[in-house]
Amino acid sequence: MDYIFFNKKTNKPIKNLRKSFIKYSKDLDWVVYPEAIRKTFSNICDRTNIPRSHFYQLLGLKKAYNPYETNLDAIDNISQLKKSLELVQEEIDKLAPCLYRTND
């Protein structure tokens, strides 16, 4: 899994953004609310025109269970979700190129 945010001191990926933002906000005299992160993510998803159901799935909200869904349908849904995630990542890279790390 590729991470967008890295800790400058340890050069390791930040896995828990909310916890890290709260920690850094004490030092920088500003506060980042989780709702602000969600709204920013929502704006980026709107720019990419991904399906709204993919937006909710990327936020971690599960898709409604469909007992009639076949394995092929599930695999197709996962591949479409991956494409949506790639579109969102490309948009983040365009808007804030310093937030991701390259393997150079």
Image (cartoon, helix red, strand yellow):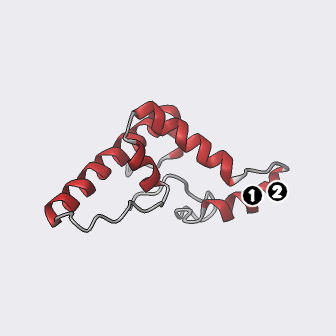
> How many numbered badges does the structure rendering display?
2
In the rendering, which numbered label is found on residue 50?
none
- Tell me the amino acid under the disc marked 2: Asp
Q: Residues within 10 Å of mark 1 (few under 14, many from 20)?
A: few
Give the CA separation, mark 2 to mark 1.
5 Å
Kindly identify which residue carries mark 1. Answer: 24
Residues marked 2 and 1 touching at CB (< 8 Å): yes
Q: Position of residue 35 (x, y in %)?
A: 67, 50
**In the rendered view, would you say 44 is above or below 9?**
above
Q: Which mark is residue 27?
A: 2
Secondary-structure class at tag 2: helix
Mark 2 is surrounded, within 10 Å at the Cα level, by few (under 14), some (14 to 19) or many (20 or more) other residues, namely few
**As drawn, is 95 to the left or to the right of 85?**
right
Q: Where is residue 75, by image quadrant?
A: bottom left
Drawn side of residue 63 relative to residue 28, left or right: left
Residue 19, quarter of the rendered image: bottom right
Residue drawn at point x = 22 percent, y = 61 percent: 74
